Amino acid sequence: MRSQFRFPAWAIFLMLVSLVSVVSAIDQARWFSQKYSGDANIVPLWSMVPRVFLLLSLLMIIAGAAGYVILLMLRKSGAQRFPNIRTWPHQR
């Protein structure tokens, strides 16, 4: 099976702009860290990762539970609408 999909020219241009932006941000961060590296109060990034992961997981669980409760209260889940789907037109 051959795929004839090709990225449009503007998408390739945007990907290149994104790549240049990321490389530039990395370079600026390296320069900033070299210039201001004398502070002893800097918290290492890896010590914050578990807290951020737990916080984001908790927020996603809360958002999922809220969405489930809303669907349950409104009784509008997709499985409850399946019996009402008509895929063929009525015969005359």
Image (spheres, helix red, strand yellow):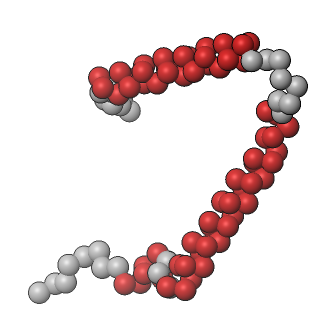
Residue 30 visible at all: no
Residue 37 in the image: state x and y as whole percent. 79, 17
Answer left or right for 61 relative to 37.
left
Q: Quadrant of residue 22?
A: top right
Residue 18 in the image: state x and y as whole percent. 46, 24
Quick check: 38 above or below 81? above
Quick check: 78 above or below 21? below
Determine the residue positioned at 74% across, 18% down: 36
Determine the residue positioned at 86% across, 30% down: 41
Residue 23 visible at all: yes
Residue 79 in the image: state x and y as whole percent. 49, 77
Residue 85 in the image: state x and y as whole percent. 35, 79
Determine the residue positioned at 11% across, 87% down: 92
Residue at the left extreme of this rendering: 92
Closest to the observer, 60 or 31: 31
Closest to the observer, 91 or 57: 57
Quick check: 28 above or below 68? above
Quick check: 11 above or below 54? above
